[in-house]
Image (tube, rainbow, N blue to C red):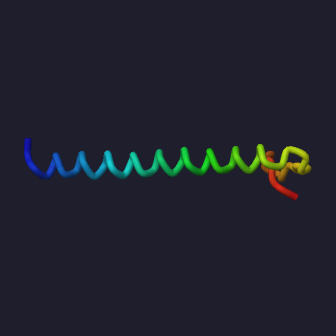
Amino acid sequence: MDLIFLELILVVVVALGLGLWQLWDVNRELKKDRDAAPDRPRTQDHDGADREP
């Protein structure tokens, strides 16, 4: 296998790993914020997504 393909695979794996880690970390923080204030009223925007007032 050529060295360029090995380098390309390494870069893609690292980029995907960082992206998945960011997604997991942000979702974890959002859940923590939701659990911290369960009595806070929530509203829905025109797109149907829950938002803070």
Residue ranking furthest to the bottom: 53
Provide residue 14's location: percent of width, then percent of height: 33, 50
Provide residue 23's location: percent of width, then percent of height: 54, 47
| Residue at 81% from the left image edge and 53% from the top image edge | 51
Q: Is residue 26 left or right of residue 47?
A: left
Q: How many marks?
A: 0
Provide residue 4's location: percent of width, then percent of height: 14, 52
Q: Is residue 15 left or right of residue 1?
A: right
Residue ranking furthest to the left: 2
Task: Choose between 9 and 26: the one closer to the eye.
Answer: 26
| Residue at 42% from the left image edge and 51% from the top image edge | 18
The quadrant of the rendering that contains the N terminus is top left
| Residue at 83% from the left image edge and 53% from the top image edge | 45
Q: Is residue 52 above or below residue 17?
A: below
Residue ranking furthest to the front: 36
The quadrant of the rendering that contains the C terminus is bottom right
Q: Is residue 32 left or right of residue 1?
A: right
| Residue at 16% from the left image edge and 47% from the top image edge | 5
Provide residue 30's location: percent of width, then percent of height: 68, 49
Task: Choose between 24 and 7: the one closer to the eye.
Answer: 24
Residue ranking furthest to the top: 1
Q: Is residue 36 left or right of residue 4?
A: right
